[in-house]
Image (cartoon, rainbow, N blue to C red):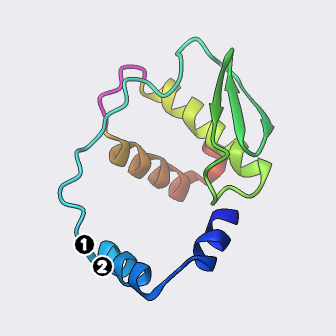
């Protein structure tokens, strides 16, 4: 949030037109990513200490830079989803897009209690 304030303070017409041009440029092709595993298979619990940190055993996952997460309960849902995916897909092989579609379909059918 502070970076946006600083950027606005130093914005010029030239920098604004460059940002508009960059936003309109196509990204090109995006390679599908398939995670090997979401978290270590032996980890059965995740500890959520704050809205910006999930601990899987002795490994911390820092999500503090994800601006969309505003409450600790959202972080808990992310942790539960990652654990669910690890349990349901131990071999991996699915792309991130496929995993997201799978979780969203399960949520639509069963609600978030599926986690």
Quick check: 97 above or below 34? Answer: below
Where residue 38 appears, as percent x and y from the top left, is 48, 28
| Magenta span dominant secondary structure | loop
* Residue 25 shown left or right of residue 47 in the figure: left
- How many neighbours does mark 1 have within 10 angstroms: few (below 14), some (14-19), or many (20 or more)? few
Q: Can residue 106 be spotted in the picture?
A: yes
Report the front residue among 64 and 83.
64
- The residue positioned 63% from the left and 78% from the top of the image is 9
Q: Are marks 1 and 2 in contact (CB under 8 Å)?
A: yes
Residue at numbered disc 1: 25
Element class at badge 2: helix
Residue 7 occupies which quadrant of the picture? bottom right
Whether 81 is among the magenta residues is no
Residue at numbered disc 2: 21
The region drawn magenta spans 90-94
Where residue 16 appears, as percent x and y from the top left, is 43, 82
Where residue 84 appears, as percent x and y from the top left, is 56, 33
């Amino acid at each position: 949030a502070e970076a946006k304030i600083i950027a606005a303070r130093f914005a010029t017409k030239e920098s604004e037109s460059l940002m508009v041009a960059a936003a309109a440029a196509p990204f090109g092709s995006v390679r599908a990513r398939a995670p090997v595993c979401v978290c270590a298979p032996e980890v059965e619990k995740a500890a959520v200490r704050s809205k910006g940190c999930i601990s899987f055993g002795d490994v911390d996952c820092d999500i503090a830079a994800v601006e969309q997460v505003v409450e600790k309960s959202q972080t808990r849902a992310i942790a539960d989803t990652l654990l669910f995916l690890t349990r349901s897909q131990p071999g991996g092989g699915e792309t991130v897009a496929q995993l997201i579609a799978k979780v969203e379909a399960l949520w639509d059918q069963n609600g978030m209690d599926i986690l």
